[in-house]
Amino acid sequence: MNDRELEIELDVDAAPEAVWYALTDAEGLLGWFASDARTELRPDGDWELASGEYRMTSRVDEIEAPKRLRVVAPPREGFAVATEFVVEARGGGTVVRIVESGFGPAESWDDEIRSRESGWTRYLENLRHYVENHAGEVAAADYLYATFSGAAASAYDALATLLRAELEVSALEEHPPRTVAARVPELGDGRVLGSIESTGEDGMIWLQLIAYGDGREQLEAVRDRIRDRLTAAFPPAGAG
């Protein structure tokens, strides 16, 4: 029996209703997580989320609005990972908890679990920024991807250097060797989140951009600028 479980919790200075909206509404999900979304809030409803060019449809397994939602991803290697979102009022604010289970027992799942733990931790920081500072604002998001060869630490340093040079940010939130994030004023106090995913000799970089309010008008230009620099820093295999 596989009993491995991942649990992450964050305190948010916002009403539970605002957090529930961000977690479950298709528009709310654009404010911190997805570039596109379609949600059917009923048992066996589709839970379709896009991260740029990647899209996945999970199934709503259980829902107790406005407190708890459990979705199950399509099986992989015979295992279906379940993700549970829990919203709880506490001390004038809200605690949001993400619990994942159903991972495969093989060592091949270890990197997946570590990646999810790192990713959800940073995404919840996006969520906190959204509900505490931009609740009710229309948001837009996009993703960029690149591949690299060699050491993940070198790729991380190159990505952090790129973001410092191309985005007007006061400081980067660095979490080596995997993630880097920052607030982006030109995106309406939006966010950038980048992650290094490596299996040893090579790996992938994903980069999320979020814009709020009038900053949405700048999203395409910022995305294209960062994409050009990302391609220059991490050229596709066979390029040149």
Image (spheres, grey):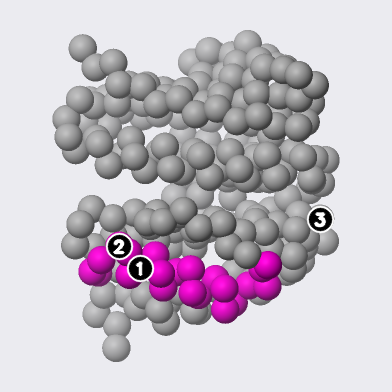
Tell me the kind of residue under disc 1. Ala
Residue 111 position in % (x across, y down): 27, 42
Image point (20%, 57%), residue name: 200
What mark, if any, has residue 229 been given in the picture? none
Image point (70%, 45%), residue name: 129
Mark 1 vs mark 2, CA separation in Å:
5 Å
Left or right: residue 111 compared with residue 183: left
> Mark 3 and 1 residues: CB-CB less than 8 Å, in contact?
no
User: Image quarter for residue 236?
Assistant: bottom left
Residue 223: tell me if it is visible. yes
Q: Nearer the viewer, residue 3 or 37?
A: 3
Q: Does the magenta stretch include residue 157?
A: yes
> Mark 1 and 2 residues: CB-CB less than 8 Å, in contact?
yes
User: Image quarter for residue 172?
Assistant: bottom right
Which SS class for mark 1? helix
Graded by Cα atoms within 10 Å as few (under 14), some (14 to 19) or many (20 or more), the crowding at tag 3 reads: some
Left or right: residue 46 compared with residue 152: right
Query: Vertically, is 202 above or below 136?
Result: below
What mark, if any, has residue 152 been given in the picture? 2
Q: Mark 1 points at which residue?
A: 155
Tell me the kind of residue under disc 2. Ala
Which SS class for mark 3? helix
Q: Mark 3 points at which residue?
A: 213
Image point (76%, 19%), residue name: 91
For the record, the magenta segment spans 149-170
Residue 46: tell me if it is visible. no
Q: Does the magenta stretch include residue 76?
A: no
Graded by Cα atoms within 10 Å as few (under 14), some (14 to 19) or many (20 or more), the crowding at tag 2 reads: many
Left or right: residue 165 compared with residue 239: right
Residue 103 position in % (x across, y down): 29, 26
Mark 2 vs mark 3, CA separation in Å:
35 Å
- In front: label 3 or label 1: 1
